Image (cartoon, rainbow, N blue to C red):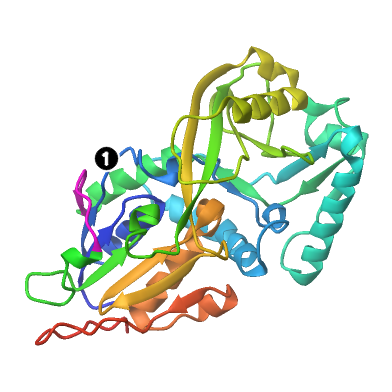
C-alpha cells in the first residue's frame, strides 16, 4: 500500500492517534497531531488499561468480529513493536482463568460459552481444561489455591504506558509535529483547501462526543499494585458472579488489577466499593497482595457506541472518524489501524468485511465551493 505524499491532521493523541501518526509518517506523509493533553496521555483511556490481548477470553462479552480483530492483533503487535526505537514489554504466554469452589456453576457456564465461541472461530487455539496438577504446572504460584482452571494459549499482553511513551519517541524521530494542550475539532480544518491538511483523522475518543452524539462513557477503575511476594507468569482472570477481575502482571512485580464497568461519564476518583471489591478479590487469588503497595488507583471512561462495537465514518469530505473502541482498545487497535490504512490507500477495506466493522463512508456535508474534496482512494 502506498499513498501519494499527503499532509494529515490527526485529532487525539491516544493509542489510535499515535499509531496512525507513526505509520503515516513512516510512509513519508507530513503529520500534525493535536491533543488536549500532554505526551503522558493523561486524558486517554489507553493510560488506564491492562492492555491484554485476549480474544477468546473476551469472546464471552463481545461479537465475533471483535474477536477476529483480537486474533489479528496477536500477529500484528510484534511487528508494530519491532519498529519502535524504545523497548516495550510484550508477552504471549496465554491467559489463565480460575475460580473458587463456590463459583463452579458460574465457571461451567463460562466454559461452555467459550467452547461454543471457539467452535464458531476455529482459528483460535483450543482452550485447555486444567485439573489441580496441570494448574500447578502452568502457574506454580497458585498451586493448592485452586482445584481447576482454564488455560487459553497464545493470548498476550503488553505494557500500555511503555507503549504510549515509545510512540511519542517514534513520532519525534519521524518528524511528526505534536501540538500538545491544543484541542481541535474537525470544524477547524477544511481538508484539501490551500494551506490546510489534505486529510483529517479524528481519533479523540470521548472528546468527539460533540460531533458523534451516540458516544457514551463506560467508566473503568484500575489498581496498580507493586507486590514483590506475588509471581504470576501471565494474565489471570477470576470467574465470579458479582465481581470478576483480571490481574495482569507487568515487569518487576507490577500488577494491573481491574474489571469494573460502570455506565457513566464520571471521571472522579475510584469509589470505596470498587476499590474494596478489586483488592479483596485479588487477595483471594493470592495472599501476597496483602503486603503489596498501592501505587495508583486510576479511573477513566472508555469511548463506547450504542452497540459496544467500533466504527469508522466519514462525515465531511476528507475527514475520517475512528471511534468506539470501548474496553478492547489494545486488542483491536492494530486491526483498526490496518483498516484505516486500507481506506486511505484504496478507498475500500477487505479487512473491514472480515472483522464485520461498520464503515460509514458517505460524507454528510458537501465540500466548500471551490475546494476539491479529497477522496480516500
Q: Position of residue 54 (x, y in %)?
A: 65, 52
Q: Position of residue 321 (x, y in %)?
A: 36, 68
Name the residue at 36% across, 42% down.
43
Number of residues whose C-alpha sits closer than 10 Å to that of mark 1, classed few (under 14), some (14–19) or many (20 or more):
some
- Location of mark 1 (residue): 38
Q: Secondary structure at mark 1?
A: loop
Q: Position of residue 240 (x, y in %)?
A: 78, 39
- Left or right of 40? Residue 72 is right
Q: Main secondary structure of the magenta part?
A: loop
Name the residue at 69% across, 30% down.
232
Quadrant holding the N terminus? bottom left
Q: Quadrant of residue 246?
A: top right
- Left or right of 153? Residue 333 is left
Name the residue at 47% across, 45% down.
301
Magenta stretch holds residue 181: yes
- Left or right of 36? Residue 279 is right
Q: Which residues are magenta?
A: 176-185
Magenta stretch holds residue 179: yes
Quadrant holding the C terminus? bottom left
Placement of 273 over or under 240, stated as above or below: above
In the image as oriented, which residue stretches furthest toward the top? 291
Q: Please indicate, yes or no, whether residue 106 appears anywhere in the rendered image.
A: yes
Amino acid at each position: 500500500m502506498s499513498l501519494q505524499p499527503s499532509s494529515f491532521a490527526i485529532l487525539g493523541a491516544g493509542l489510535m492517534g499515535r499509531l496512525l501518526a507513526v505509520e503515516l509518517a513512516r510512509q513519508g506523509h507530513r503529520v500534525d497531531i493535536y491533543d488536549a493533553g500532554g505526551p503522558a496521555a493523561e486524558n486517554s483511556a489507553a493510560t488506564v488499561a491492562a492492555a491484554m490481548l485476549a480474544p477468546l477470553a473476551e469472546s464471552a462479552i463481545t461479537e465475533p468480529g471483535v474477536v477476529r480483530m483480537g486474533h489479528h492483533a496477536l500477529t500484528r503487535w510484534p511487528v508494530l513493536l519491532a519498529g519502535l526505537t524504545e523497548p516495550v514489554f510484550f508477552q504471549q504466554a496465554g491467559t489463565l482463568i480460575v475460580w473458587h469452589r463456590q463459583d463452579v456453576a458460574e465457571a461451567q457456564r463460562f466454559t461452555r460459552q467459550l467452547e461454543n465461541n471457539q467452535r464458531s472461530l476455529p482459528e483460535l487455539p483450543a482452550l485447555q481444561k486444567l485439573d489441580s496438577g496441570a494448574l500447578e504446572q502452568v502457574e506454580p504460584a497458585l498451586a493448592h489455591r485452586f482445584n481447576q482452571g482454564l488455560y487459553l494459549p497464545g493470548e498476550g499482553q503488553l505494557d500500555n504506558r511503555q507503549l504510549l511513551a515509545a510512540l511519542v519517541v517514534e513520532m519525534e524521530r519521524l518528524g511528526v509535529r505534536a501540538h500538545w494542550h491544543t484541542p481541535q475539532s474537525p470544524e477547524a480544518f477544511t481538508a484539501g483547501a490551500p494551506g490546510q491538511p489534505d486529510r483529517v483523522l479524528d481519533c479523540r475518543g470521548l472528546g468527539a462526543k460533540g460531533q458523534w452524539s451516540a458516544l457514551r462513557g463506560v467508566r473503568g477503575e484500575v489498581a496498580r499494585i507493586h507486590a514483590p511476594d506475588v509471581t504470576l507468569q501471565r494474565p489471570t482472570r477470576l470467574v465470579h458472579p458479582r465481581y470478576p477481575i483480571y490481574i495482569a502482571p507487568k515487569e518487576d512485580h507490577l500488577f494491573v488489577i481491574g474489571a469494573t464497568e460502570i455506565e457513566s461519564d464520571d471521571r472522579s476518583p475510584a469509589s470505596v466499593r470498587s476499590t474494596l471489591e478489586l483488592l479483596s478479590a485479588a487477595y483471594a487469588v493470592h495472599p501476597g497482595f496483602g503486603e503489596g503497595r498501592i501505587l495508583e488507583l486510576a479511573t477513566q471512561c472508555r469511548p463506547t457506541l450504542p452497540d459496544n462495537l467500533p466504527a469508522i465514518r466519514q462525515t465531511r469530505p476528507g475527514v475520517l472518524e475512528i471511534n468506539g473502541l470501548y474496553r478492547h482498545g489494545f486488542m483491536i487497535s492494530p486491526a483498526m489501524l490496518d483498516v484505516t490504512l486500507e481506506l486511505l490507500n484504496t478507498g475500500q477495506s477487505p479487512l473491514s468485511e472480515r472483522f464485520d466493522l461498520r464503515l460509514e463512508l458517505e460524507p454528510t456535508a458537501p465540500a466548500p465551493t471551490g475546494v476539491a474534496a479529497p477522496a480516500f482512494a
